[in-house]
Each structure stands twice: as C-alpha cells, then as structure tokens.
Image (cartoon, grey):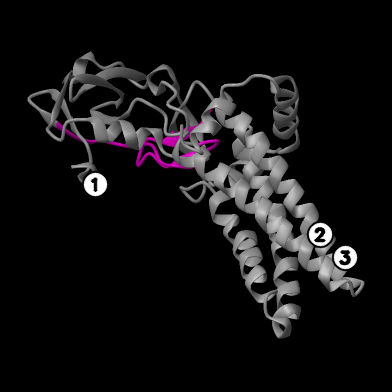
Amino acid sequence: MSLMGILDRVADLDAFDKVIEPARRAVQGALKPQALKDFLHGSWLGHPLHPVLVQVPVGSWVSAGLLDAIPSMRPAATVLIGTGVAAAVPASLAGAADWSEQGTGVRRLGAIHATLNIAALGLYVGSLAARGKGRDTLGRVLSYSGLGIAGGSAAIGGHMSYAQSSGASHAATAARALTTEWIDLGPLDDLPEGRPALRTGQGGSVAVPLVAVRRGTRVDVFVGACSHLSGPLYEGMIEKVAGEDCLVCPWHGSAFDLEKGQPRRGPAANPQEKLEVRMDAGRVMARVPGRHR
C-alpha cells in the first residue's frame, strides 16, 4: 500500500463521526447568511476559493523557513510568518465551508487536516511571541515545527483533492465519458415544459445521465451529475436564484443558471457542464462542448 493510500483506510473509519458531525453542523450554523457561504465556496469565482487563499500562508511560511536560515534575513522571516498567520484565517473559513458540504470520507480526512492546521498555526503564533520577547532560537524551532506540520497537512489536503475529488468538478468527469458525436435525445414534444427531464447519452460502454430543460422551443441540456458531488440534477427543480432561471440540485441546493451553467448558489463552485444543442426535424440533438472533443 502506498503512503497516501493509508489515508483511504483512515477515511473508511467511523470512530470519530460522533465528534465530526456536531462540528459540521456548527460550521454550517455559523456560516450564515447564504451570501457568505457562497463567497467562501467560491461560487462567484467559478472555482473553489480555499485552494486560492491557502497559497498565501503556505507561500509565506515556506519563504520564512528559507529566510530564517540566513541570519541577516530573519527580520523579514518574522514579517512573513505574521503574514501567513493573518492569511490563515480567511483560508480556514473557506476550507471549513467546503468541508461541511463534502462526503463522509472527505469530512473524516478534513478533520485531521484541520487539526494539523490549527496545530501549525498555534506554533507559528508561539514563534511570533517568542521572537517578540527576543527568544529567537525558540522562535525558529517553533516555526520550523509549524512548517513540518503544515506540510503534512497540505499532503492530506492534496489527497482529499486528487484522490477523493474534493473540489473537483464531477460533471466534467462525466462529460469526458460521453461520445463526441451528436446525441439524439428524442422529440421536442416529449420533453415536459419548465422542469428537468432525464435523458441519457452514450459514454463508451455505459449510458451517461443527462438532464434536459425545455422552455417553449428552447432546450438546455446538461450533464446529469452535479459538479459538486454528482447529485442527480434530473431530480431537481427550476428556481429563480439571483434573478436567473436556475437548475437546482436536490442534494445540497446548488443552483446553476440555465443560460451557461454558472453556479449562482453554492456549495458548488464549478460550473455545470452544458452541452451544445440543435434541432433536427423536431428532435433534440446534443453534443459535448469543444473542450471535451
């Protein structure tokens, strides 16, 4: 088993779920109103905000570690440590917002990730206090210890992202499985007016769920799996969100505008994959966009 593969075993354990679940509910209760959660999720950005924000504390602390090795540069290292401590606050808020809306395995590893980050932050705060009192050697010991723990935590965060698809677009993965040819979704008249309808597209040896929404003679077609956590959008509803007609996921309430598939309400941050549509003798034809062909 690979070193990172051990984390998958950890994600299977339910030993701490009785602690994690109350913490998750507390985070969801604290991060209100909805506009604040959408900001922290990165719905407005079209990309999760947390990985963007963490670049500042991580970059600051790594740079501080290098400068601390040069005696004349240690005052600059102290400034960078303080910058990282300050930047860690919004980064942790965005991470907590995302964590509270993830699947079980990600939440379990996320709890470890957060615990290590808190420990690293405490060591860096202690380093600043020690440096302020002239105890520079202790300050360096604490900051290097914090850097080591933060590095381990970052490795767990990377595993959550790449191995467990935390923050990745599940809709993009499904879109890549579709054929690149035009897909016949049947007659326009068979689609219900103003509500999602399940259709399927050929994806190699398996059928890929699609969702079609008819509004008069216009049809919008999306990959059926929500970009957030693969929720069945064809079981969702059409709702006005931020002034736009949106397709709303039944699992977590993410809303995507029908015009372009952009997220108008989180927790989804990634857009929903939308297919090209044309009419052929009264039949609806759809095809994946050019980036997937």
The kind of residue on which mark 2 rests is Val
Q: Which residue sits furthest bottom?
A: 72
Q: CA distance from mark 2 to mark 3?
A: 6 Å
Q: Nearer the viewer, residue 140 or 282?
A: 140
Residue beneath disc 1: 291
Numbered tag placed on residue 235 in the rendering? none
Which residue is situated farthest in the right direction here?
133
Q: Which residue is under mark 3?
A: 129
User: Which disc, if any, is residue 125?
Assistant: 2
| SS state under label 1 | helix
Label 2 vs 1, first from the N-terminus: 2
Disc 2 residue crowd, few under 14, some 14–19, many 20+, Cα 10 Å: many
Kindly identify the residue that appears in the image at 38 percent across and 39 percent down. Answer: 261
Measured as percent of width and height from the top left, residue 144 is found at: 71, 62
Q: Is residue 260 magenta?
A: yes
Residue 51 sits above or below residue 135 on the image: above
